[in-house]
Image (cartoon, rainbow, N blue to C red):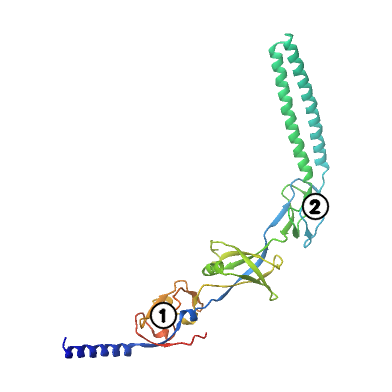
Amino acid sequence: MSVAVAQDETAAGRDAAAAASADAVQARTQRWADAALRPQREASAAVRARNESRIAAEVGGRLLRWTREAGEPVARGELLAEIDAADHRLARDRARASVEAMQARLALAERQLARAAELRGQDFVSPEVVNQRETESMLARAELDAARQQLAAAELALARTRVTAPFDAVVRQRMAQAGELVAPGTALYLLAERGASEVVAAVAPDDADGLRAAGSWGFETADGRTLPLRLLRVTPLVDPGTRTVQARLAFTGETAPPGAEGRLRWLDPRPHAPAAAMVRRDGRLGVFVVESGRARFVALPAAQEGRSAPLALPEDARLVVQGQAALVDGQPVAVAAASPAR
């Protein structure tokens, strides 16, 4: 190559660089590791008892008395209400007498069978007589079993006239009055389990991954206290009415009473692009990064206006934090580094 040609190519390169420099847009960038946010998120939440049960009568009768009012605590197995047991006690006694009668009948049938077998050995009775006695003994035994089952059912019904708490609870509502006739299934009490409260929160689906990844969670009460929690589960189903998913968490120390309302707060550990760095291109929200002196648009499909969005970039990537409104994808950029302070 001649010296003249080389000089021409060098001049052409300088001219192209000058033209590119003239077309370059001034922008300020920041290292991604310094620009990325890890925002605090929050969602409305309320404390719910893990078990909230309607305690109903299992047998019919007149309600003689109740022992607890709304708001009072009750221990597991403690009496809540008592139903008149007179009819059930009579049924138990009748079943018990029937068992005793069936026991006597079986004893007689077994003695008759033994006697028939003895006489058969002496050829005093036919085999049919022995078979008949065996059948009578089997029938008496079956009738005794049925009578015993009836007695067990009568004793169970009698025991159910005493309505007890199935777990440690607080009475949310008393639903029956003394003197009322109640039938099986009549609601008597509404109980909320004690010591097993959960925090239930409605979380935006876009925040669900960050909620799962967070290392700590807190329930902020109405009086400003923050009670630590641990995550139990996040449902994958989106509520069609609220467009949220449900998260359930448990207290790890101090608890709030069932019914308390507050805010669930957590720190999203995923790096997020600042809302101020986002622009809209072709109907999509995203950010610009500078690669080899040119702008590259990175779309954020889940981003929302005015809200930071999760974004994965190399730590040393250069995020455009000023001047992005004038950029288009692939455009040369004249970069001035921004201060790392946020």
Residue corresponding to mark 1: 288
Out of 244 and 310, give the one closest to the viewer.
310
Circle 2 residues within 10 Å: few <14, some 14–19, many ≥20: many
Q: Residue at x 77, y 50 (%)?
A: 163
Point out the image quarter for the N terminus: bottom left
Give the mark nearer the N terminus: 2 vs 1. Answer: 2
Indicate the secondary structure of the residue bearing disc 1: strand
Q: Looking at the image, is 182 positioned above or below residue 257?
A: above
Q: Quadrant of residue 226?
A: bottom right
Residue 283 in view of the camera: no
Residue that sits furthest to the top in the current view? 123
Q: Position of residue 197 (x, y in %)?
A: 68, 63
Q: Position of residue 118 (x, y in %)?
A: 75, 14
Q: Is residue 25 left or right of residue 195?
A: left
Residue 141 in view of the camera: yes
Q: Amino acid at mark 2?
A: Ala
Is mark 2 in CB contact (under 8 Å) with mark 1?
no
Indicate the secondary structure of the residue bearing disc 2: strand
Q: Looking at the image, is 115 positioned above or below residue 18?
A: above
Q: Looking at the image, is 139 positioned above or below residue 149?
A: above
Q: Amino acid at mark 1?
A: Phe
Q: Nearer the viewer, mark 2 or mark 1?
A: 1
Circle 1 residues within 10 Å: few <14, some 14–19, many ≥20: many
Residue corresponding to mark 2: 81
